[in-house]
Image (spheres, rainbow, N blue to C red):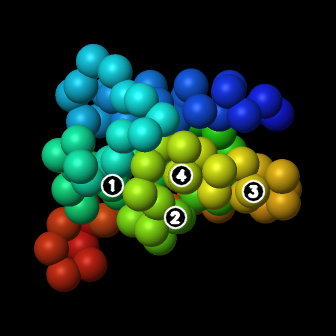
Amino acid sequence: MTATTDIEDVVAAVWADVLGVERVAPTDGFFALGGYSQQAVRTVHLLRDRLGVAVTLRDLMSASTLADFTAAVRVRAEAGAPARPMPRLTGRRGTR
């Protein structure tokens, strides 16, 4: 994906799905829409899978709006750093 609008559309769709809202505007914030930490982790995983971009939790947490986060995702995409799989922890104390 190269067009900003394409990336923004994917990010907005993931946010809407994860947050259970109908629509996300460029000026909306993830946490302002009711997002919390587990949803943030899920969002990062989904975007890494769908976009193949090394999006980080820090990117999401430091962006105040969808537009800001999309800009960070675009920078990572242009840098060409592929997403490496994130570890998926499912149990307590490191058990899987």
3 or 2: tag closer to the N-terminus: 2
Which residue lies at the image location 33% right of the left edge and 48% below the top edge?
30
In the rendered image, which residue does mark 3 sit on?
75
Question: Which of the image's four quarters has the C terminus?
Answer: bottom left
Name of the residue lying farthest toward the top: 22
Task: Determine whether the residue tagged by mark 1 lies in a helix, strand or loop.
Answer: helix
Task: Determine whether the residue tagged by mark 2 lies in a helix, strand or loop.
Answer: helix
Marks 1 and 4, how far apart in space? 12 Å
Marks 3 and 1, how far apart in space? 19 Å
Q: Residues within 10 Å of mark 2 (few under 14, many from 20)?
A: some
Q: Residues within 10 Å of mark 4 (few under 14, many from 20)?
A: many
Which quarter of the picture shows residue 10?
A: top right
Numbered badge on residue 40: 1
3 or 1: tag closer to the N-terminus: 1
Image location (x, y in percent) of residue 58: 47, 70
Decide: is 47 above or below 5: below
2 or 4: tag closer to the N-terminus: 2
Q: Is residue 90 left or right of residue 27?
A: left
Numbered badge on residue 69: 4
Image location (x, y in percent) of residue 47: 53, 43
Q: Is residue 68 left or right of residue 21?
A: right
In the rendered image, which residue does mark 2 sit on?
59
